[in-house]
């Protein structure tokens, strides 16, 4: 999540059933470079029991990791993103290069101008 890697260990040779088993039974490893608040946030988001998971029993935005986040500015979309990916050319963004750039007209049509904010977040 915060590192760009999957939270549960898998390598290129991991079979699908083994990957599912690792996700269900395994515990994620956290790099030492992540702060205590971020590790705690991730641990609470990845709880196996959904009733104990952050976002079910408590609001995600109330977690200490987000204590300096101005949620009003987030909702207004007035904040500058902390990381802006460098894109040298549009040609490098073919469907085969990145699954996030795949064209899916149905999804695009559904999500166009999507700005729903859960009332409980207000």
Image (cartoon, rainbow, N blue to C red):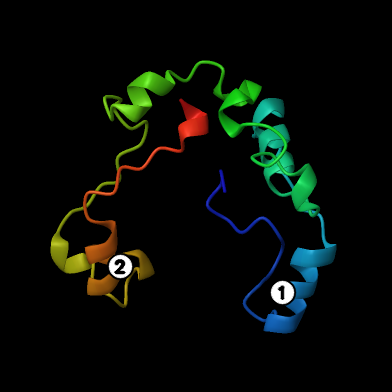
Residue at the front extreme?
A: 119
Residue 102: x %, y % from top left:
29, 72
Q: Nearer the viewer, residue 21 or 6?
A: 21
Q: Secondary structure at mark 2?
A: helix
Q: Is residue 15 visible?
A: no
Image point 79% across, 54% down: which residue?
48
Please name the residue shown 66% across and 72% down the image: 11
Please state if 78 lies on the left or on the right of 32 as rendered. left
Relative to 85, is 101 above or below? below
Q: Is residue 26 above or below residue 45?
A: below
Q: Where is mark 1, residue-wise?
A: 19
**How many numbered discs?**
2
Is tag 2's residue or tag 1's residue first in the polypeptide sequence?
A: 1
Q: Is residue 38 in view from this perspective? A: yes
Nearer to us: label 2 or label 1: 2
Residue 89, by quadrant, is bottom left
Q: Which residue position holds label 2?
A: 107
Residue 90 image position (x, y, % from top left): 15, 62
Question: For this rendering, which residue is in front, 77 or 118?
Answer: 118
Please tell me in which quadrant of the rendered image residue 62 appears: top right
The answer to which of 38 and 10 lies nearer the viewer is: 38
Secondary structure of residue under mark 1: helix
């Amino acid at each position: 999540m915060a590192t760009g890697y999957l939270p549960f260990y898998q390598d290129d040779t991991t079979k699908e059933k083994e990957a599912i088993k690792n996700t269900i039974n395994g515990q994620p490893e956290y790099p030492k470079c992540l702060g205590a608040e971020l590790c705690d946030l991730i641990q609470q988001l990845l709880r196996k029991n959904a009733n104990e998971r952050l976002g079910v029993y408590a609001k995600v935005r109330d977690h200490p990791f987000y204590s300096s986040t101005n949620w009003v500015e987030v909702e207004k979309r007035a904040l500058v993103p902390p990381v802006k990916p460098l894109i040298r050319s549009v040609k490098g963004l073919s469907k085969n290069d990145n699954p996030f750039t795949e064209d899916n007209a149905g999804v695009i049509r559904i999500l166009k101008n999507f700005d729903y904010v859960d009332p409980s977040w207000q």
